[in-house]
Amino acid sequence: MNVERDGKMCELCTSTGGTALWESPTCRVVRVDDPHYPGFCRVIWTAHVREMTDLDPGERQSMMNLVFAVEKVVRNLFAPDKVNLASLGNMTPHLHWHVIPRWRDDGHFPEPIWGTKQRDGRPRAVVSDDTMRQALRKQLHPEDNQG
Amino acid sequence: MNVERDGKMCELCTSTGGTALWESPTCRVVRVDDPHYPGFCRVIWTAHVREMTDLDPGERQSMMNLVFAVEKVVRNLFAPDKVNLASLGNMTPHLHWHVIPRWRDDGHFPEPIWGTKQRDGRPRAVVSDDTMRQALRKQLHPEDNQG
């Protein structure tokens, strides 16, 4: 599964890519450690696949369901002004989605976080990894919380 | 449907947003006129909705199916090195997806197209709007092309 590119191993094949929040055999959700974008998560396909259309339709749907579950959790816990979703992979062509909460006064708004910095951002309210884990589990398995 | 923001009308409520390639009552696909990224398309939800999780699950799935159909067409017609998918909406918070073909020698690679310019890009092979329209129709309705 560790595929070399330009002489380097794929970093999403060889490392988690962030703090693990949730995992299945096909997919994982990790949190990116950035105090300016505190709910920033990545949804990463386990296998080294390049594009969404390299997955079959059912796999695509299951990955997107996970992306949208993360979006819901991020909206609920962080109340951002906007959510940015992106699957780029130019540097690391191993399928992964960025789920990024954005605020009007964050460091790059209204540019994407990869654009020109607009101002000094400020660190945001702290939400623990465990709180995110629990919220994501509840979002993905609401039946576990009934009765 | 024309919603004001900062005193301005939403541009995706008041204009097509590009050259129309395909349309349904809920969604449209338009082509962005950029010779450096010739297959660059946007998939735009008709109603003024902000986030993917403001749609119901069936609506989300139908929009993503359209995004992935566009990705397939772009891969088939333009053979990019990578496809970038993004739903940002910081400037225009009206749900729309960017489907962007990328090449290793394009103007921004490996940065996102919103990042720092890396080099002069070069205009790419011309594919007509009609060719894209036909390919997208075929992708979305393969049964129309059977005997």
Image (tube, coloured by chain):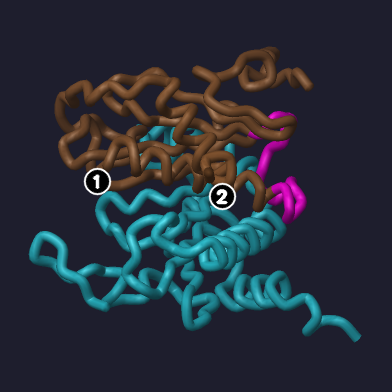
Chain colours: A cyan, B brown
Q: Residue furthest front?
A: B147
- Residue A101's mark? 2
Q: Secondary structure at mark 1?
A: loop
Q: Quadrant of residue A44?
A: bottom left
- Specify whether B36 is left or right of A86: left
Q: Quadrant of residue A117?
A: top left
Q: Residue furthest right?
A: A147
Residues tagged by mark 2 and mark 1 found on one chain of the structure: no
- Specify whether B54 is left or right of B76: right
Type of residue at label 2?
Pro
The residue depicted at 27 percent of the width and 42 percent of the height is B79
Labels 2 & 1 near each other (Cβ < 8 A) = no
Q: Secondary structure at mark 2?
A: strand
Output the chain of dot 1: B
What segment is highlighted magenta in the picture?
Answer: B45-59
Residue A143 image position (x, y, % from top left):
80, 80
Question: Does the magenta run of residues contain A74?
Answer: no
Eye-nearest disc, 2 or 1:
1
**Structural distance between the alpha carbons of marks 2 and 1:** 28 Å
Residue A49 image position (x, y, % from top left):
34, 65
The residue depicted at 75 percent of the width and 21 percent of the height is B3
Residue B64 image position (x, y, % from top left):
58, 48
Looking at the rendered image, the quarter that the N terminus of chain B falls into is top right
Residue A108 in view of the camera? no
Residue under label 1: B81
Q: Nearer the viewer, residue B48 or A110?
A: B48
